[in-house]
Image (spheres, helix red, strand yellow):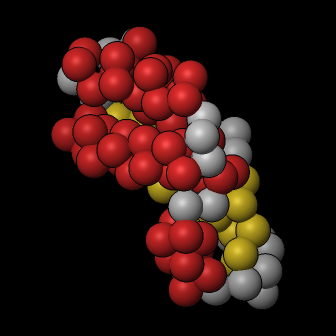
């Protein structure tokens, strides 16, 4: 399970908008497993706020959201020149 600790929800939004590679990897890996196993929904990761360490919030994606999330991952991987992952994403998109 991937756990991300952030100071605020705004920090999480900023990391998502900036294409944080660790978050992108978590999204890609979980969707890839979900497609392979034909899941209708996957748990992507958990988030904990630094000022609320006793709480953890789980983030899920429904299968209908997979294509959009994969396209976002594709953009990040293209920027990072991770072309093997780009090819995997294109194959996953064809399967959806």
Res 34 visible? no
Task: Pinpoint residue 48: horizontal percent, then vertical percent.
Answer: 70, 69
Figure quadrant of the C terminus: top left
Task: Pinpoint residue 77: horizontal percent, then vertical percent.
Answer: 54, 43
User: Looking at the image, which is closer to me, 64 or 18?
Assistant: 18
| Residue drawn where x is 62% and y is 60% of the image | 20
In the rendered structure, the answer to whether residue 15 lies left or right of residue 65 reads: right
In the rendered structure, the answer to whether residue 75 lies left or right of residue 71 reads: right
| Residue drawn where x is 69% and y is 51% of the image | 22
- 10 is higher (above) or lower (below) than 48: below
Res 83 visible? yes
Figure quadrant of the N terminus: top right
Task: Pinpoint residue 75: horizontal percent, then vertical percent.
Answer: 43, 50
| Residue drawn where x is 51% and y is 76% of the image | 13
User: Looking at the image, which is closer to me, 73 or 65?
Assistant: 73
- 23 is higher (above) or lower (below) than 92: below
State which quadrant residue 56 falls in. Answer: bottom right
| Residue drawn where x is 60% and y is 35% of the image | 82
């Amino acid at each position: 399970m991937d756990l991300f600790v952030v100071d605020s929800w705004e920090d999480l939004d900023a990391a998502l908008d900036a294409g944080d590679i660790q978050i992108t990897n978590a999204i890609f890996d979980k969707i890839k497993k979900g497609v392979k196993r034909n899941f209708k929904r996957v748990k992507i990761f958990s988030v904990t706020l630094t000022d609320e360490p006793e709480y953890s919030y789980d983030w899920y994606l429904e299968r209908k959201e997979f294509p959009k999330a994969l396209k976002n991952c594709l953009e990040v991987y293209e920027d990072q020149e991770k072309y093997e992952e780009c090819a995997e994403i294109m194959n996953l998109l064809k399967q959806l």
